[in-house]
Image: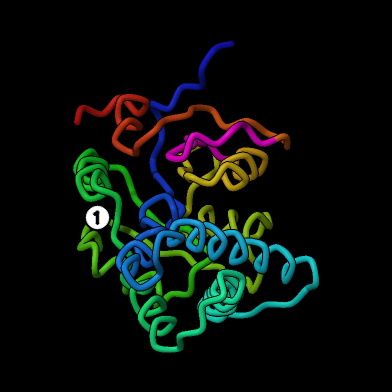
């Protein structure tokens, strides 16, 4: 099967959580307080966060991602029999300033210097995203931060992906979308983007239409696909 040509990409659009920012970072910073089950709590926190976005979208309801993240944390802590309001508050504060993955700043810088527009497209609230961007010091490399707040529904609804077309003023064939979440990568491809799945966590292929164009392990591996030298 012939691989698609990414040489005419004008913009790279990135998912935020799990792709640019490490969703395990909050629990990792508090692993002494959380104990040996800190990773399982983090995984459940993330799972419930995503599940709540999907359920609310199906219901036709919308809540801020911050509130959903807090609700998901409460579920995860109760499931792990942890009752500590101060610890919960610390975890939520860290979530505003999650660590980015090591290769992220240099990858975005290289794309920007090559004349490629870069943007975030996320379920996150604007203030959450801006805090994470500021903490990671990657704001100078971004042309836009796009949030589902503007359409009041979460990924993978097509209206979310359409935000990138509208705000960047580009057709889907000129956009490369990057996500570490398999469901997001497959859904973005079904929408019509060129898609690079940054499969950081060795997930199996999703059993939904449509398969991403490329699969990589870290974001810097996308550069040769766009014919850009690191």
In this orientation, which residue lies closer to the viewer: 205 or 57? 205
Above or below: residue 7 compared with residue 206: above
Residue at (57% x, 32% y) in the render = 212
Above or below: residue 99 compared with residue 171: below
Judged left or right of residue 113, residue 145 is right
The percent coordinates of residue 77 (x first, y second) are: 54, 74
Residue at (32% x, 58% y) in the render = 143
Judged left or right of residue 130, residue 151 is right
The percent coordinates of residue 101 (x first, y second) are: 29, 50
Residue at (43% x, 75% y) in the render = 126
Q: Is residue 30 visible?
A: yes
Q: Predominant secondary structure in magenta?
A: loop
Q: What residue is shown with label 1?
A: 141
Decide whether residue 199 is among the magenta residues: yes
State which quadrant residue 193 falls in: top right
Above or below: residue 29 compared with residue 222: below
- Residue extent of the magenta highlight: 193-206
Numbered disc total:
1
State which quadrant residue 131 falls in: bottom left
Which quadrant of the figure contains the C terminus?
top left
**Are there few (<14), some (14-19), or many (20+) residues within 10 Å of tag 1?**
many
State which quadrant residue 139 falls in: bottom left
Q: Is residue 149 visible?
A: no
Decide whether residue 3 is among the magenta residues: no
The percent coordinates of residue 134 (x first, y second) are: 25, 70
The percent coordinates of residue 44 (x first, y second) are: 57, 61
Judged left or right of residue 43, residue 200 is left
In this orientation, which residue lies closer to the viewer: 14 or 40? 40
The colour scheme used here is rainbow
Residue at (63% x, 80% y) in the render = 63
Q: Residue furthest right?
A: 59
SS state under label 1: helix
């Amino acid at each position: 099967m012939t691989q698609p040509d990414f040489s005419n990409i004008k913009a790279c659009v990135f998912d935020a959580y799990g792709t640019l920012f490490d969703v395990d970072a909050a629990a990792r910073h508090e692993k002494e307080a959380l104990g040996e089950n800190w990773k399982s709590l983090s995984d459940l926190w993330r799972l419930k966060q995503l599940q709540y976005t999907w359920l609310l979208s199906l219901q036709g309801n919308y809540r801020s991602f911050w509130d959903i993240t807090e609700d998901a944390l409460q579920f995860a802590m109760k499931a792990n029999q942890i009752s500590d309001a101060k610890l919960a508050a610390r975890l939520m504060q860290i979530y505003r300033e999650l660590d980015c993955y090591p290769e992220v700043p240099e990858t975005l810088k290289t794309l920007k210097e090559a004349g490629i527009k870069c943007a975030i497209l996320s379920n996150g609230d604007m203030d959450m995203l801006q805090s994470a961007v500021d903490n990671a010091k990657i704001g100078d490399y971004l042309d836009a931060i796009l949030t589902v707040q503007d359409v009041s529904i979460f990924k993978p609804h097509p209206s979310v992906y359409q935000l990138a077309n509208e705000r960047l003023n580009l057709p889907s064939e000129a956009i490369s979308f990057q996500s570490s979440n398999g469901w997001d990568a497959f859904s973005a491809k079904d929408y019509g983007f060129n898609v690079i799945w940054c499969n950081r966590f060795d997930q199996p292929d999703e059993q939904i239409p449509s398969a991403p164009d490329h699969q990589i392990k870290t974001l810097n591996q996308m550069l040769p696909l766009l014919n850009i030298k690191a």
